[in-house]
Each structure stands twice: as structure tokens, then as C-alpha cells.
Amino acid sequence: EIIGREVLVPEYPQLTGAIGAALYAM
């Protein structure tokens, strides 16, 4: 999860936030 975030943050900061929230909820 952390690795995925670091990779996506520079490309899609907003999208990463949404995905992170969804993954965290699941």
C-alpha cells in the first residue's frame, strides 16, 4: 500500500487520495 502510494503520488495526487481512502476502508 505504502509503495503504491509513493509511486502514484507524483502522477495522480488526487486519484491516489481516493484510492488510498478506498483501500483503507476495505
Image (spheres, rainbow, N blue to C red):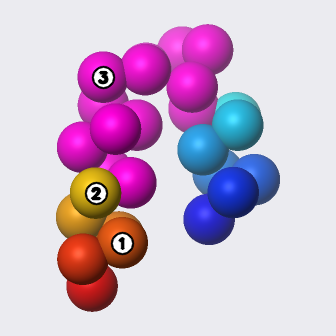
State whether the magenta stretch is mostly helix, strand or loop: helix
Figure check: 8 above or below 12: below
Identify the secondary structure beneath mark 2: helix
The vertical placement of 11 against 8, above or below, is above
Label 3 or label 2, whichever comes before in sequence order: 3
Q: Quadrant of residue 16?
A: top left
Give the position of the N terminus as an image quadrant.
Answer: bottom right
Q: Position of residue 5 (x, y in %)?
A: 60, 44
- The quarter holding residue 9 reads top right
Q: Amino acid at mark 2?
A: Ala
Q: Are marks 2 and 1 in contact (CB under 8 Å)?
A: yes
Tell me the tag on residue 11. Answer: none
- Quote the CA–CA distance across marks 2 and 1: 5 Å
The part of the chain drawn in magenta is: 8-20
Q: Residue at x 24, y 64 (%)?
A: 22
Residue 11's spot in the image, x, y percent? 54, 15
In the rendered image, which residue does mark 3 sit on? 14
Looking at the image, residue 18 lies above or below residue 25: above
Q: Is residue 5 left or right of residue 12?
A: right
CA–CA distance in space, label 3 to label 2: 11 Å
Q: Residues within 10 Å of mark 2 (few under 14, many from 20)?
A: few
The residue positioned 27% from the left and 85% from the top of the image is: 26
Left or right? Give the position of 13 relative to 15.
Answer: right
Q: Secondary structure at mark 1?
A: helix
- Between the residue at mark 1 and the residue at mark 3, the CA separation in whole angstroms equals 15 Å
Q: Which mark is residue 21?
A: 2
Give amino acid for label 3.
Gln
Q: Looking at the picture, how far across and down is residue 12, in whole percent?
A: 43, 20
> Is residue 1 rendered to the left or right of residue 13?
right
Residue at the location (34% across, 38% down)?
Answer: 17
Which residue in the structure is indicated by mark 1? Answer: 24
Q: Looking at the picture, which amino acid does disc 1 mark? A: Tyr
